[in-house]
């Protein structure tokens, strides 16, 4: 028994090391003097906090970048939660002709990697004249571009007793009111889970902003990060410092939401 | 006085026909219980009345007005569910207020009506609690409160007591009956528990395989079951059914001869005998196969010639398997049914033999 426990702890430590070391490496490197290059992870010389100021300066207009990214992320999270839960409710509990077909299409869409539709999507947004706006970044998520999340919400709503919706209908609710007054408040674990996933995905998204955003004043943090990597004179310590700054909100949000998040994953796992 | 009518309601789900031309009428202030085995369509019937399901054919009428296609809220109906269906995220007070809020009543009116219903059901001290902090009995009381708070035109109950333990079930049964009598709102009450159906209903509807078998007063349903299906559904242990061949228009059992105009043209009839009415005697001898002690009585299964009979009553203490036992048939109420259809044969005035 004791041995098994020790082995378990050892394994956990090993995994923690695998995830923790890159973070440690990032922080230590970000504090090195200029031109030191990559460091294996010793603490000596790691005192150059001015790297952070330099990194922020080099990224361009940091407040604008931050504002753009936050705006984009909030819009995506809000839109994603709204449409995925609404669609999930409809697929779970509203009786309409073609519902199973719709659900089949959603499931089918899960099989396509995002990149398959990338070119078609780009052509579509170009013909709509929406390149170099936030629309191509926000619209796909707001319009339910995440079949997996729709599926998760549907399964979750299916797991709630059907009588709950029936009672609300008898008590005078329309389907929309049932969703808003009963289903949504009950799906907090799912909202946190999907919200976190969407937050991380949007915050860290590099590819879509790279393709669609052209004007400098519309750029996001991840684009600015990429600007550090140059062919001849990549300033490693600045790249790491900037990365640390960009990473910080993710870690913060994740740890704050972790307890709820884990509960949500458990729910999703047991209902999925 | 409100009157709820269901006329020739049929409903299928895919290939399964759940309701077959069911007609029912709940008159003003009446308490109509619907009883049947599970899967007989009683919950579907209730959902059709509520407007949660649309019937494939047939009409639902409220005071003579066809209300097919009306949303439940427009029908002004309240429903109580087996699993209570309380909103878990709302306090008891908000649960009670929920239907009133949806009806956009003013805050003062809502508060007054919630207080009133809570007081009526003894919930006043629980108003701040969440459903998860309540016992099963309290939860069902809140569900009742949510139903009466709106003063609806009719009530629907879907096995509201099935999830409660037997003692609580008895208590709430009395409470529901008193509440309904006081409010005088027509009520359709679905249950699979025959005791509930007989004790609560001013009339009882027996539903089997989506068909109405009988609608009558509890006494009549008990004393004159319309078919073998009704007869075996009500009563525990259920009624003994004996197939008796007719020879020359006569059936024989244990030296007794039965005959009459109602047997005319048949070659076989079914005789129904309630287990608790078969008392010790000398008319029919048999052998005990199995005894179940139930404290105040025993349930005995025995083989009497070709017939297997269940008896329920105080027999000799220590009665055991393999022993001989005799029962009396004189003055035992006999129920006669047609052998093929299972329908009750008309009663006849007794005649001298």
Image (spheres, grey):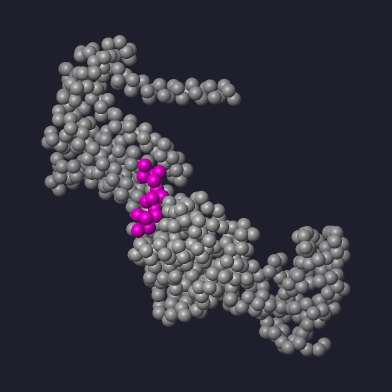
Q: Quadrant of the C terminus of chain A?
A: top left
Residue at image location 23% in from the left, 46% down from the top: A139
Placement of B224 over or under A55, stated as above or below:
below
The verdict on residue A271 being magenta is no
The verdict on residue A182 being magenta is yes
Q: Position of residue A100 (x, y in %)?
A: 38, 55
Placement of B164 over or under B304, stated as above or below:
above
Q: Position of residue B308 (x, y in %)?
A: 77, 67
Judge left or right: residue A129 versus residue B91: left
Residue at image location 37% in from the left, 58% down from the top: A178
Judge left or right: residue A49 versus residue A159: left
* Pick the front one: B227 or B102: B102
Q: What residue span does the magenta drawing correspond to? A: A177-192
Q: Quadrant of the N terminus of chain A?
A: top right
Placement of A50 over or under B345, stated as above or below:
above
Q: Position of residue A115 (x, y in %)?
A: 26, 38
Q: Is residue B308 visible?
A: no
Residue at image location 55% in from the left, 63% down from the top: B159
Q: Position of residue B65 (x, y in %)?
A: 40, 79
* Pick the front one: A193 or B305: A193
């Amino acid at each position: 028994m004791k041995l098994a426990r020790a082995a378990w702890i050892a394994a956990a430590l090993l995994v923690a090391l695998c995830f923790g070391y890159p973070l440690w490496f990032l922080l230590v490197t970000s504090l090195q003097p200029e031109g030191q290059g990559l460091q294996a992870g010793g603490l000596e010389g790691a005192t150059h906090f001015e790297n952070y100021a330099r990194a922020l300066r080099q990224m361009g207009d940091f407040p604008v970048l931050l504002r753009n990214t936050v705006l984009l992320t909030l819009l995506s999270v809000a839109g994603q939660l709204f449409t995925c839960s609404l669609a999930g409710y409809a697929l779970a509990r509203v009786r309409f002709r073609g519902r199973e077909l719709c659900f089949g299409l959603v499931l089918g869409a899960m099989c396509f990697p995002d990149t398959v539709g990338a070119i078609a999507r780009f052509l579509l947004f170009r013909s709509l004249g929406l390149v170099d706006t936030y629309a191509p970044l926000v619209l796909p998520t707001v319009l339910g571009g995440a079949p997996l999340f729709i599926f998760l919400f549907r399964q979750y709503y299916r797991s709630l007793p059907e009588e709950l919706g029936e009672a609300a209908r008898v008590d005078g609710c329309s389907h929309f009111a049932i969703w808003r007054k009963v289903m949504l408040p009950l799906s907090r674990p799912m909202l946190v889970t999907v919200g976190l996933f969407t937050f991380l995905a949007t915050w860290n998204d590099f590819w879509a902003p790279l393709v669609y955003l052209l004007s400098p004043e519309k750029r996001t943090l991840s684009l600015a990060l990429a600007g550090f990597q140059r062919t001849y004179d990549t300033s490693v310590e600045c790249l790491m410092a900037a990365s640390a700054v960009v990473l910080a909100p993710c870690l913060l949000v994740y740890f704050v939401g972790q307890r709820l998040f884990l509960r949500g994953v458990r729910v999703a796992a047991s209902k999925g | 006085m409100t009157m709820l009518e269901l006329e020739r309601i049929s409903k299928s789900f895919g290939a399964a026909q759940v309701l077959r031309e069911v007609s029912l009428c709940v008159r003003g202030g009446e308490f109509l219980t619907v009883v049947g085995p599970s899967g007989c369509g009683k919950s579907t019937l209730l959902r059709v009345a509520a407007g949660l399901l649309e019937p494939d054919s047939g009409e639902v009428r409220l005071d003579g007005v066809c209300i097919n296609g009306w949303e439940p809220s427009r029908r002004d109906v309240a429903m109580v569910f087996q699993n209570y269906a309380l909103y878990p995220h709302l306090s008891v007070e908000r649960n009670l207020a929920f239907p009133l809020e949806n009806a956009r009543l003013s805050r003062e009116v809502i508060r007054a009506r919630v207080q009133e219903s809570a007081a009526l059901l003894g919930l006043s001290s629980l108003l701040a609690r969440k459903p998860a902090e309540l016992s099963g009995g309290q939860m069902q009381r809140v569900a009742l409160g949510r139903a009466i708070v709106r003063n609806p035109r009719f009530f629907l109950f879907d096995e509201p007591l099935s999830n409660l333990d037997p003692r609580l079930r008895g208590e709430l049964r009395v409470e529901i009956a008193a509440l309904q009598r006081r409010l005088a709102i027509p009520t359709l009450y679905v249950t699979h528990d025959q005791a509930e159906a007989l004790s609560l209903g001013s009339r009882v509807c027996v539903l089997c395989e989506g068909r109405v078998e009988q609608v009558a007063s509890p006494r009549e349903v008990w004393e004159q079951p319309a078919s073998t299906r009704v007869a075996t559904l009500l009563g525990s242990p259920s009624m003994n059914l004996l197939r008796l061949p007719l020879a020359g228009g006569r059936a024989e059992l244990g030296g007794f001869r039965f005959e009459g105009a109602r047997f005319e043209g048949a070659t076989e009839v079914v005789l129904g005998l309630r287990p608790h009415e078969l008392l010790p005697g000398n008319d029919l001898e048999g052998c005990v196969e199995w005894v179940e002690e139930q404290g105040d009585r025993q349930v005995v299964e025995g083989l009497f010639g070709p017939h297997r009979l269940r008896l329920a009553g105080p027999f000799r203490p220590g009665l055991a398997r393999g022993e001989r036992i005799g029962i009396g048939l004189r003055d035992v109420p006999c129920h006669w049914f047609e052998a093929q259809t299972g329908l009750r044969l008309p009663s006849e005035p007794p005649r001298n033999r």
